[in-house]
Amino acid sequence: MLPKELYDLIQAGESHTVEFKKSTTDITKDVYDSVCAFSNRDGGHIFLGVMDDGTILGIQPDCVDRMKKDFVNSVNNGNKMYPPLYLIPVEYEIDGKIILYIRVPVNPGVCRCSGKIFDRNHEADIEITNNEQLVYQLYARKQDTYYVNKVFPVFSVKDLRHDLLERARDMTKRRTERHAWRSMNDEELLRSAGLILKDLTTGREGITLAAILLFGTDQLILSVLAHHKTDAIFRVFNKDRYDDRDVIVTNLLDSYDRLISFGEKHLNDLFVLDGLQSISARDKILREIVSNLLAHRDYSNAYVAKLVIEKDRIFTENSNRSHGYGSLKLATFEPFPKNPAISKVFREIGLADELGSGMRNTYKYTKMYSGGEPSFMEGDVFRTIVPISAAATSTVGPDPYISGDEVSTEVSTEVSTEVSTEVKLSADRLLSLLEYCRIPRSRKEMQEYCGIKTEKYFREKIIRPLLKFKLIERTMPDKPNSPRQKYIKS
């Protein structure tokens, strides 16, 4: 009888690792395509005698033995499947019908079927034989080495920027005051970080691509990795293109700073408490997603990495040497090192923590920042999506992306609708009050303007939330030592 775990796979339907084949009397050609694709990707499960929608057709009983022999002979034939695979179909019965189950493990090398290379994408087997980039990425996944460990014997430590290496030494204070790097010269630091290696094919020693990405001049970086680029985009008002953009083509330390600055420029630092302590959840989130974007990227791929801020979300995308496919779950997530040399430097200088902590921290601080949960999508392109509230990107008053004094009524209304829930005013009354505060107003003037009688209620339900969302700010008293506080629209 069919084991429960296999029955559950059938019930869940086809996926990145599950394939159904009708094959009721013969092994069809596309079965071997799936074997090849699963071998090249993450392994998988093939069920023969099952329709695409999961309906159990069953294999004709007098065909079962022949189909088993045909399959075994084919996958062991180097002309059909190379390298030969030692797989055996297992016969099971379900609802009185016979099916064949084939478990395909990941192959350590690249597998070909009839001279063609197949890879798995979603629920499909894709032939990639003539796609040079995809074939290269497949071979890279199968290798035990990392692309950023590529050695450049023609370059030396002198070709790197001493000021960046000195900056890295200084940044180690974030981790410990007496860090070992602080007493090392440039070459000793690079060796300690695994950034000077020996080319195993030539035996020549040199600095690695990781060293160049971290500490190289912009010209040197582009000479060894012409497609290196990170795109930062703010797209809230002009949704067809963008409102602001920074195309970053420089070393990873400066790239980190520019991406963080871009996020701080366009995301409001909402008031958040972690226990009794006020923290910047925005800064914590940016630190995690930016360090992940830079440290775990597949630099062999020309796919442009990006950080995008939209009205209701922040998301990052980067090419990825994947170890699975689909949504990652915090409870079952198993981290894999992507670029250990770059990750080590980021940890030592305080830009990242231990492997796997970024996902936990992003969950924690997203909850505080917006109340939502981030999502992490593993694949050839890795995506991190952080939901945000409208208050995170809100601007009240003149729209900074429209020339002149034109006011973005639509944006102001959207923001005030969300904020008004906490401020305890309707959207129209909130906008009216903010317009009233274009010149400094006292609490009493504001309270009378709103027609609210109770001072305590007005302070707690109106003043405090407006300050929290930075829609108003306190002004200096009119006279020294005057207790009279006024407020003005931010």
Image (tube, rainbow, N blue to C red):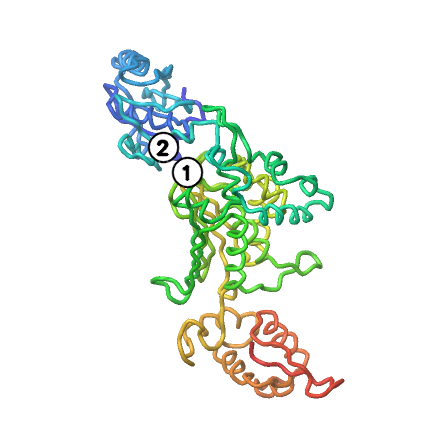
Q: Write down the residue under mark 1.
A: 300
Name which residue lies at 55% across and 41% down: 158
Question: Which percent across, then down, holds residue 490?
Answer: 56, 76
Q: In which quarter of the image is the N terminus?
A: top left
Along the horizontal axis of the image, is 199 left or right of 93? right
The amino acid pointed to by label 2 is Tyr
Residue 301: x and y in percent read 39, 40
According to the picture, the residue beneath numbered tag 2 turns out to be: 136
Q: Tell me whether the residue at label 2 lies in contact with that at label 1, contact meaning CB atoms closer than 8 angstroms.
A: yes
Q: What element carries label 2?
A: helix
Q: Which residue is drawn at 64% across and 80% down?
A: 475
Question: At which x and y percent is residue 187?
Answer: 60, 37
Kind of residue at disc 1: Ser
**Mark 2 or mark 1: which comes first in sequence?**
2
Element at badge 1? loop
Q: Position of residue 167 (x, y in %)?
A: 62, 49
Q: In this view, does 179 lie above or below 45?
A: below
Q: Is residue 244 left or right of residue 476?
A: left
Q: Give the numbered dot on residue 38.
A: none
**10 Å crowding of disc 2: few (<14), some (14-19), many (20+):** few
Q: Hey, which residue is sitting farthest right in the picture? A: 481
Residue beneath the point at 52% across and 45% down? 292
Q: Nearer the viewer, residue 132 or 395?
A: 132
What separation in Å lies between label 2 and label 1 (alpha carbons)? 9 Å
Q: Residues within 10 Å of mark 1 (few under 14, many from 20)?
A: some
